[in-house]
């Protein structure tokens, strides 16, 4: 079982940056891929990025070139660096262990124009 907890959300202006962190505890964090999702009011959750256990990243087209996902397995940490933020990036961001039901409670990101 993996427990996940996000941190680093906040409110910024368009064009600014934020870094989100997903801290894992429990056995096996380093052996699972980690997804980031976001959810805005009235919309379904949107997949944002994935990093495999081996460190290979994949991104949604909407964030490609602006977001960078990375992981430090020694620290049980996955980071999402978000640059050139847009109002459309606003939402509740949460991390999820790939192919499991385990996810964190999420952090709010608000980008104002």
Image (tube, rainbow, N blue to C red):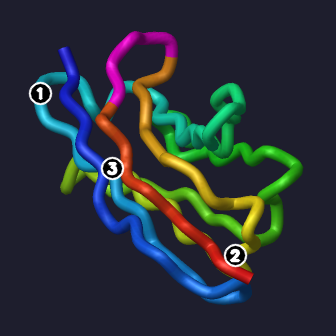
Q: Is mark 3 on a helix, strand or loop?
A: strand
For the point 78% across and 58% down, the residue is: 63
For the point 35% across and 27% down, the residue is: 103
66 vs 71, left or right, is right
Kindly check if marks 2 and 3 are in contact, taking CB atoms under 8 A apart as contact: no
Q: Give the main secondary structure of the magenta stretch.
A: loop
Find residue 110 and report its horizontal and vertical position in percent.
Answer: 55, 67
Q: Is mark 1 on a helix, strand or loop?
A: loop
Q: Is mark 2 on a helix, strand or loop?
A: loop
* Quadrant location of the C terminus in the rendered image: bottom right
14 vs 20, left or right, is right
For the point 76% across and 60% down, the residue is: 88
Magenta span: 99-103
Residue identified by numbered label 3: 22
Find residue 7 and report its horizontal and vertical position in percent.
Answer: 29, 59
Look at the image and tell me whether residue 73 can be seen: no
Which of the two discs, 2 and 3, labels the residue nearer the N terminus?
Answer: 3
Res 26 label: 1
* Quadrant location of the N terminus in the rendered image: top left
Residue identified by numbered label 2: 85
Q: What is the tally of numbered marks visible in this picture?
A: 3
Mark in front: 2 vs 1: 2
- Tell me the distance, in whole angstroms, between the alpha carbons under discs 2 and 1: 32 Å
Spot the residue most to the front.
42
Look at the image and tell me whether residue 83 can be seen: yes
For the point 42% across and 11% down, the residue is: 100
């Amino acid at each position: 079982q993996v427990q996940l907890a996000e941190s680093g959300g906040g409110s910024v202006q368009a064009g600014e940056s934020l870094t989100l962190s997903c801290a894992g505890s429990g056995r096996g964090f380093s052996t699972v891929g980690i997804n980031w999702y976001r959810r805005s009011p009235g919309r379904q959750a949107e997949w944002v990025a994935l990093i495999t256990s081996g460190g290979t990243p994949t991104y949604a087209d909407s964030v490609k070139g602006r977001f960078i996902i990375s992981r430090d397995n020694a620290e049980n940490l996955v980071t999402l660096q978000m640059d050139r933020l847009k109002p459309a990036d606003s939402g509740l961001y949460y991390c999820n262990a790939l192919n499991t039901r385990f996810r964190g409670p999420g952090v709010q990101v608000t980008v104002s124009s």
